[in-house]
């Protein structure tokens, strides 16, 4: 079945540092990859999505690309702010046999001023 | 503004009692989902629906029922609540097609004592 692995449980940075979060996925189909962000006390919300391998998605200063060859999907931001502190989920959407999404376990980002 | 609204925001229930969590969406989405979120487990799919009158089992359906009486409303029912069902529950809605993203509600925090 489809699966998503996020190895980084927590990332701690100072403001203006570079952010890089990676995830790997497994599927036999043609996936769309998403990044969702969850702030304390709220539900997850879509940050960005990438529908085609090697294309780039971007939103609010975040960028993401996925590499079909290495089945990896990463999220990056050049300069983080304290307000970026949240949990980031890598999510795989795949339509073979009926559309479903699979959530990764999440990466908690803590940014100190 | 299109949205997903969950009620109640907080609920305390007694063991063995019946609990109903409600979700309403104004996105005109066909699909709706119920997840629970626990520390160490991320988001886990309980039940989902492809439209009014339909419900499908997710990955952890035991102890839960779902009801979709209309396009807009999707309920999660705990007939005999147990302390192990203490969790934060999220409802989401999404379109049918591949590449579809989800809109989440703000969650219901349930404590079963």
Image (tube, grey):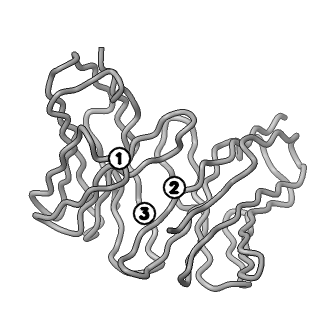
In the rendered image, the vertical position of residue A50 relative to residue B36, given as above or below: below
What is the secondary structure assignment of the residue under circle 2? Answer: strand
In the rendered image, the vertical position of residue A107 relative to residue B31, given as above or below: above
Marks 3 and 1, the one that precedes in the sequence: 1
Residue A41 at x, y = what percent?
50, 35
The disc label shown at residue B102, or none: 3
In the rendered image, the vertical position of residue A13 relative to residue B67, given as above or below: above
Q: CA distance from mark 3 to mark 1?
A: 19 Å
**Same chain, labels 1 and 2:** no
Crowdedness near tag 2: few (<14), some (14–19) or many (≥20) residues, C-alpha within 10 Å: some
Query: Between tags 1 and 2, which lies in front?
Result: 1
Q: Residue at x 53, y 57 (%)?
A: A103
Between residue A71 and residue B103, name the one nearer to us. A71
Q: Residue at x 40, y 43 (%)?
A: B106
Chain letter for mark 2: A
In the rendered image, the vertical position of residue B25 relative to residue A68, given as above or below: above
Residue at numbered disc 2: A45
Q: Residue at x 28, y 47 (%)?
A: B61
- Quadrant for residue B53, please give it: bottom left
The disc label shown at residue B60, or none: 1
Q: CA distance from mark 2 to mark 3?
A: 8 Å
Residue B66 at x, y = what percent?
18, 49
Query: Between tags 3 and 1, which lies in front?
Result: 1
Residue A65 lies left or right of residue A94; in this view the side is right
């Amino acid at each position: 079945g489809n699966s998503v692995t996020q190895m980084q449980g927590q990332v701690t940075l100072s403001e203006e540092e570079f952010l890089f979060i990676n995830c790997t996925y497994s599927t036999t189909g043609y996936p769309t990859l998403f990044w969702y962000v969850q702030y304390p006390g709220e539900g997850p919300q879509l940050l960005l999505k990438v529908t085609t391998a090697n294309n780039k998605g971007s939103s609010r200063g975040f960028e993401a690309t996925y590499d079909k060859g290495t089945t990896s999907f990463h999220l990056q931001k050049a300069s983080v702010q304290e307000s970026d502190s949240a949990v980031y989920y890598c999510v795989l959407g795949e339509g073979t046999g009926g559309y479903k999404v699979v959530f990764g376990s999440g990466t908690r980002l803590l940014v100190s001023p | 503004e299109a949205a997903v609204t969950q009620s109640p925001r907080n609920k305390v229930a007694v063991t063995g009692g019946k609990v109903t969590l409600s979700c309403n969406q104004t996105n005109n989405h066909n699909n709706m989902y119920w997840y629970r979120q626990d520390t160490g487990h991320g988001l886990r799919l309980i039940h989902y629906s492809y439209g009014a009158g339909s419900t499908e089992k997710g990955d952890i359906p035991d102890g839960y029922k779902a009801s979709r009486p209309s396009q807009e409303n999707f309920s999660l029912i705990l007939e005999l609540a147990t302390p192990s069902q203490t969790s934060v529950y999220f409802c989401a809605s999404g379109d049918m097609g591949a590449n579809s993203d989800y809109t989440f509600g703000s969650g219901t925090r349930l404590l079963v004592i």
